[in-house]
Structures are given as C-alpha cells and as structure tokens.
Image (spheres, rainbow, N blue to C red):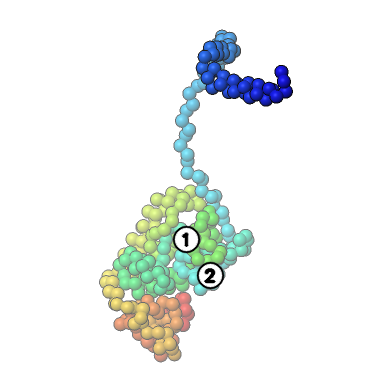
Amino acid sequence: MSASSRPLRAALCALAAIAFYFFGRSNLPPRPALPPPATATVPELAPVEAEEQPAEAPQAAPPPKKAPAGKPWQRLDGCTWEADRWNDGDSFHILTGSEPPEIVARLYFVDTPEAETAYRDRIAEQAAYFGITKEQAVDIAHEAAAFTEKQLAAPFTVWTRWNSALGRSALGRVYCVILTKEGDDLAELLVANGLARIYGVKTVLYDGRDSQEYLAHLGKLETKAKAAKIGGWRFATATATPKPAQTVSTTPPAASLAGGCVASKNSAVFHKPECKSVPTIFPANLVKFGSREEATAAGKKPCAICKP
C-alpha cells in the first residue's frame, strides 16, 4: 500500500467504527443477567430457657407518713425582761443569760391588743372580741404591756421549742411559755386579768398537757374575768364608736399638742402628744391637759409606752 492511500484507509475505518456504534449495537444479543448475590444463612438456634427465679412475696404498702416530731422543749432559767420600744403584753425582748443571749418571746395561746396604729384592722378585730371600742382596745394594750413588765420584774423561766413566730426584729421571734418567779403562767395571768384574748398558736405543753385541756382552763379563767368585769371586760357594755371619715388627717398633730398631755375621754390613760397611740384617738374624744399633774388629778394614769 502506497503512503498516499493510508490516510484514506484510516478515515474509512473511523467511519465504520462510528456506524457500528450507532447502528450495530441494537443487533447484538442481550447481556445475560447476573445471578443475585448469595446470602449467608444463619442457623436457627434452639431457644434458651430462662433460669427460674424464686417468686417474690408481694410487698406491703408503705405505712402512712407521720407528722414530724416537734422540737423538744428547752427550759431557760434566770431570764430577764429587756426594755424595748416594741415590747407589748404578749411579745417582748428577753435576756437569757446563755445562747442565744437575747430573744424575742411570743406567748403561745393568747393575744393582747395592739397599740401600734399600723395595725388598725387587727385592733378592730381585738376590740370586737371584747365588745369594746378600738380606743379602749388600745388602752388595754398599754395596760397589758405594763402588766407583763411588772410580772417579769424578777428573773423568770422560759419554756420554748424554738418554733419561729416571725416578727420584724432582726432577732426573730420564738413561741414561748413564760413562768414568773412565783411559778405563775404569764398567759394565764393575762387572761385572768382580762388583758388578752384566747387566740394564737397552740401546742402540747412542756408538762405533757394537751392543748385542748389547756384551752379549756383558759376559758374558765376568761369566764371569771368577764363576770368580775376586769381588764377589757370592764368596757364590755360600750358600743363601738363609728370611724369618722379621714380620721388620720383630722387628728391634731403632735406639734399643736405640745406642752401638756392628751387622752381620750373614753380612756383611763394619758399620753405624751408624740406617743404612737395618739393618732388612734378620734378628734371628737381628744382631751388635753396642761400638765401631768392635771391629767392625774382627772383620774387618768400614765401610758406604759411613752411614760409621760
């Protein structure tokens, strides 16, 4: 083959290959299908019987939870009453002579009237208990505070379970039973003298007496105080004085009362003009005295809080 014919031959071969690619493939027999891949067979294992366990006895239902036991009573002897601006008949500062050195005691079972003007609703509730006016209830508050201070003039005994009675003092307050030097229960003395209502937190007593038994005892003391018309019960026939509109704004300011003492005409107590109890006196009932002697001559006695 000559050299000049080689390119022609190469071109014809290329055309033949193209024609075969497009037209000759359709006449070829189909490619046989490949067999599916073999799958491994896992021999079936005989079931293994579970090891027999002894039957458990049915568990009984848990017993009902009992209330947690109260803190044990602790006795503090030789305690002394500590003067404080917030002391009243049923709540007061005490020096214990041990740890903690000072506590604020709150009596169980009883509640003396409030002298603080911030507690108007509470004063109204306490007055309703005795069937007296709110002014008279404030008078009883002062009498109760003076009574407690007198009863605790000598060292006394405190029984407490250290249960919190809340309160505003940084020391907190704890509920207590107080026994005077003579061994008298202060709560009983307050009720017997008509200076406290039977009210408040209750507990089993330090000597094992049930609270209901103790309440029944207080009830008998209160009945005697009512019959004798002592303390708050001496006012029991009085009718509540209606609250005038804008009571606070119409009460004379302390500055206008300077230079003497003041009292309510329905009260047996007189005060300094700046005493915290003065705003509770209704303006129509306010009585002014030029001096302490004048108030005393009128049959009034000094307030145990402001000590005029």
Which residue matches tag 2?
A: 153
Q: Residue at x 43, y 54 (%)?
A: 202
Q: Nearer the viewer, residue 167 or 11?
A: 11
80 over 248 or under it: above or below? above
Q: Residue at x 27, y 74 (%)?
A: 242
- List x then y, in percent, for residue 262: 39, 84
Which residue matches tag 1?
A: 107
Horizontal side of residue 24 vs 280, given as left or right: right
Horizontal side of residue 15 vs 232, given as left or right: right
Q: Amino acid at mark 2?
A: Ala
Q: Amino acid at mark 1?
A: Leu
- List x then y, in percent, for residue 68: 50, 45
Q: Nearer the viewer, residue 56 or 272?
A: 56
Q: Nearer the viewer, residue 51 or 111?
A: 51
Horizontal side of residue 238 vs 207, given as left or right: left
Horizontal side of residue 42 vs 1, given as left or right: left
